[in-house]
Amino acid sequence: MSLIFYARVSSKEQNLERQIARAKQVKADHIFTDKLSGKTIDRPGLNQLLGFAREGDTVEVVSLDRLSRNYQHIQQLVQRFKERKVKLIIDDLPQTNTGNALVDQFMLDMMLNLMGFVAQNEREKIKERQQQGIAQAKKRGVYKGRAKKYAPNSKNREGRLVYEKIKEQYLSGNYESKSQLAKDNEISRQQLYRILQSINKDI
């Protein structure tokens, strides 16, 4: 029986230190991580965890939204753990121990459903506020669109470095193919095409 810890942040710029520290504190046997949005459950680290977990194992996360921010996805994951008889521990949820396994499971299910609903509702409210802010900015004529991550003047240091590296490789012809260029810089082909479009405009 293994204690498996899952840690997730939403982007490469964020760090996993706090969650990894917790994994070490509880002496996790295995740690799986992702640096991807919680909008989808198709993540490399999570997929590896689901393929690894066996009956009798325990999966631990610091909070429910590390698994997902989507209510239906949370339900799917919880159901998969149940079917495999894998225990789930959410650090910021109170642990129940009434001595009756059926009552404990019922209370856990109830809390998970409530917290899953709250997580999704919070995400939808954030999106709604963002859309309202964009609409107001457009009315005032000050909306500039989403800031580009990969640009020469990006506020993101990593984004600026990636942009300059791609620009140097592209203009010098020092690459095998556009697909390889995207892979070497750990970005998608769509992101690469947007960068190249920007570079071509500046030439």
Image (cartoon, rainbow, N blue to C red):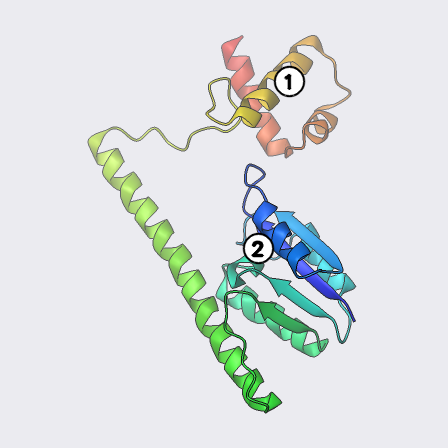
Q: How many marks?
A: 2
| Marks 2,1: beta carbons within 8 A | no
Label 1 sits on a secondary structure element that is helix
Residue drawn at point x = 24 percent, y = 29 percent:
141
| Pointer 2 local density, CA inside 10 Å: few below 14, some 14–19, many at least 20 | few
Question: Residue 60: which quarter of the image?
Answer: bottom right
Q: Which residue is mark 2?
A: 40
Q: Position of residue 28 (x, y in %)?
A: 71, 60
Residue drawn at point x = 61 percent, y = 27 percent:
192
Front residue (pair 201, 44): 44
Residue type (three-letter) at the residue carrying disc 1: Lys
In the image, farthest residue toward the front: 25
147 is higher (above) or lower (below) than 26: above
Q: Position of residue 186 (x, y in %)?
A: 67, 32
Q: Which residue is mark 1?
A: 165
Label 2 sits on a secondary structure element that is loop
| Pointer 1 local density, CA inside 10 Å: few below 14, some 14–19, many at least 20 | few
Q: Position of residue 86 (x, y in %)?
A: 70, 74
